[in-house]
Amino acid sequence: MLRREGIARENIDDAAVLAELTERVVTRLSASELDILINDCCFKEEKRLRKSKDPEEQAYLGRLREARRRLAWASKEELVGILRGIVAEYSAEIHGHFDPGIYANATRILPKGLALLLRNQKPWQVLRRSFKGELTLADRIRHTGHVGSFDRLVERGTCVLVPTHLSNLDSPVIGFALHDAGLPPMIYGAGKNLFNNWLLSYFMDHLGAYKVDRDKKNQLYKEVLKEYSTFALEKRWHSLFFPGGTRSRSGMVETDLKKGLMGTALAAYQQNLRRGADQPRLYFIPATINYHLVLEAETLVDDWLQEAGRSRYIITDDEFSRPDKVLTFVRSMMSLSNPIEVVFGQPIDPFGNPVDEDGNSLDPQGRPFDPAGYVSPDGEVVSDDQRDREYTGRLARAIGDSFLANTLLFDTHVLAAAVHRRLEAHHPRLDLYRRLLLGLDSRRFPTQEVDAEIRVLQEALRKLEAAGRVRLGEVVRSGTPQELRISAVKHFSRYHGSRAIWGREGALILEDPKLALYYANRLVGYPLPEPLPPHPGGRS
């Protein structure tokens, strides 16, 4: 049953939304130096699309060139008109078209399709279980953490869900978790490249996605995108965005977060206070999405390790672009009892303070207080860009801390870290890149030596979990080093084209050091002891 909250609360008049959004942006920017703003837009877009052969992009480029030619002699009124035309075009491109009927049908059909992929069963067995009402993904995509608080807060204000981002599978995974938890649909920004497939585009466009073109670097586009987010939050459309900005190329937990869209929540909160909104509060819900294996790991880590790849924001040719690879991946996970887990962290207000389940902001002593005083010290809301940037910085740090505390470390992460630590211990004078180039003989370690390193990591991680600073998978928390090693090696053999780590004749072989590094990097950011010194007996 569709929960009539957020964007599903009422029918949306798309034309009215676009008109209001355009007017808001034009009004806000009309006092700025419009010729410079518009020229920057036209110049950067012309540079980006100069070699494009797409007819629609060429037509768009023609309109921008005409606008640029008019700048030199345009009056203020004409500049506002040019601005309005570009903003209207950007608004129409960004805005989604949420359809409650399509959402309700999709949430009935898609879980069964996902279950067919994730279960080791024949199609007729799946259908039989479906008719009996037994078909569920609850044992394949779990959700834990502060779900109850999240459920209460969607009725008390506007929620902004901010998850970690590892894979293009994150969107359907988090969508299922929200639906399974009985939470309402949310709008979310999706990369324009994901709309290239017409079928996927149709569903995304009608299930709450709005379009984000990360190739557009001009300031005007960014202003429209931020205004759309602010507008949506003021309308009490619960929102989702990935604050890391893109999938983690390294596999590390994201702590260097994008603050642009975070700041729109603070702007929306201040506007809610000014107009006396009934439910002015906004709440951030950090969440982590945790996998034993990651579909695109090989491509992502390769991109991260290449200096040129660090500036390549969008990868269009990774594993997610190949349906056969996606199918192979999800089927390879079918025998795991809990291959994917979404952990919802404690809610946070736009100033970085923790929030209880009743929506109260809490001070460092755990006492409730009204955060409106942060922006209205004398009872009247006062705008201050520098102050607000500081508040948003505090929020970003609080979200980063929550990501670390609620990341779930599996056996694959710990074994990969243990073996890379052994490599580092044996070659302390080599940097990371030189260690990755070592031959196979240098990447072979006795199981006894690796088990000792695993034990050191388990002991440290268990203390961190007891202090609430990380979460551990069952084998990491309770298993012996031998059990963890055997489990992780088995997992590494399931999907990837090459095996990250392989066991043979009493030794562990770091077969694909780059792939193993991707999983080992999940432990970066946690205080861990130094690697053990080299084993007296040397490598096997």
Image (tube, helix red, strand yellow):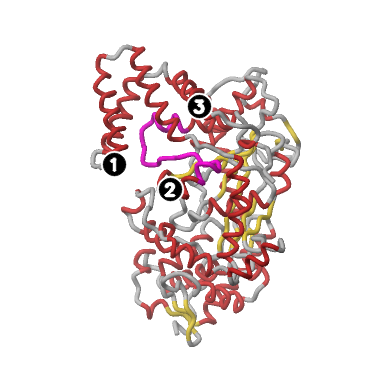
The stretch in magenta equals: 203-225
Q: Earlier in the sequence, mark 2 or mark 1?
A: 1
**290 sits left or right of 315 in the view:** right
- Looking at the rendered structure, the secondary structure element under dot 2 is helix
Question: Would residue 147 be counted in the magenta stretch?
Answer: no
Residue 536 in sight: no
Residue behind mark 1? 54
Residue 129 got which mark?
none
Residue behind mark 3? 15
Residue 198 got which mark?
2
**412 sits left or right of 58 in the view:** right
Instruction: Compute the Cα span from label 2 to label 3.
Output: 23 Å
CB-based contact (under 8 Å), mark 3 and mark 1:
no
For the residue pair 407 and 7, the one nearer the viewer reads as: 7
Residue 249, given in percent of the width and then of the height, sits at 43, 55
Residue at screen point 45% across, 65% down: 517
- Looking at the rendered structure, the secondary structure element under dot 3 is helix
**Front label number (2 vs 1):** 2
Residue at screen point 47% across, 49% down: 200
